[in-house]
Amino acid sequence: MAEAQQAQSETSATVAAEKYSNVSFSIWPPTERTRDAVRNRLIETLSSPSILSKRYGTLSREEAVDVAKLIEEEAFEVAGKAGTTDDDGIEILQVYSKEISKRMLEKVKARSGDSAAAPEAAPANEAPSKAEEEDAGSTAPPQSEKTESVADDE
């Protein structure tokens, strides 16, 4: 009985393989729905608290919508021009993904550079204290948050 079921399974698999052997699968170009999902994810990343926003700040939702649209369109155009011999679109999708990442980082860095220029014009009486200056470039936690190692207790 088990042999009959196994033979039937193998026959079904063979028929399915023959049926779909002429099917072509390609992931490039992405559908409009996929591109919308990419833009929505960019908007969320640019306008929500994240590791990126801790370093470069967040954008307003409205600004993030405009920037996300621009980033995605530019990346799509660059990836579309990248000629590959890849039949299924994997390589071109990688170009698209890398372009999105690169452009997103460029935009937030440029924006952060613009906003960093503004504080230089602050009045002299609002100058940061020496402790604030020392902590400004540090990613280490403040002294009050540091803990001693427990390695000596063993």
Image (cartoon, rainbow, N blue to C red):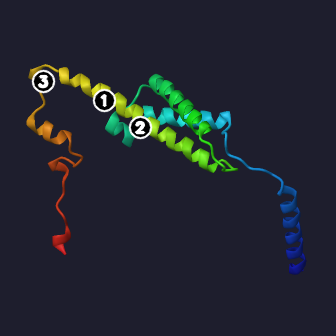
Against 95, residue 72 (above or below) is: above
Residue 126: mark: 3
Which quadrant holds residue 125?
top left
**Side of 73 where 139 appears, left or right:** left
Q: What type is the residue that disc 1 sits on?
A: Gly
Q: CA distance from mark 2 to mark 3?
A: 31 Å
Residues at discs 1 and 3 in contact (Cβ within 8 Å): no
Residue 31 image position (x, y, % from top left): 68, 37
User: 28 or 126: nearer the eye?
Assistant: 28
Could you say whether the residue bearing mark 1 is in a helix, strand or loop? helix
Say which quadrant the N terminus sits in. bottom right
Q: Earlier in the sequence, mark 1 or mark 3?
A: 1
Crowding near pointer 3: few (<14 within 10 Å), some, many (20+)? few
Residue 105 image position (x, y, % from top left): 41, 37
* Residue occupying image coordinates x 90% and y 77%: 4
Say which quadrant the C terminus sits in. bottom left
Q: Earlier in the sequence, mark 2 or mark 3?
A: 2
* Residue occupying image coordinates x 18% and y 54%: 146
Residue that badge 2 annotates = 105
**Side of 122 where 28 appears, left or right:** right
Residue 38 image position (x, y, % from top left): 57, 37
* Residue occupying image coordinates x 39% and y 33%: 108
Could you say whether the residue bearing mark 2 is in a helix, strand or loop? helix
Could you say whether the residue bearing mark 3 is in a helix, strand or loop? helix
* Residue occupying image coordinates x 25% and y 25%: 117
Q: What type is the residue that disc 3 sits on?
A: Glu
Q: What type is the residue that disc 2 sits on?
A: Leu
Residue 113: mark: 1
Residue 126 image position (x, y, % from top left): 12, 23
Residues at discs 2 and 1 in contact (Cβ within 8 Å): no
Q: CA distance from mark 1 to mark 3?
A: 21 Å
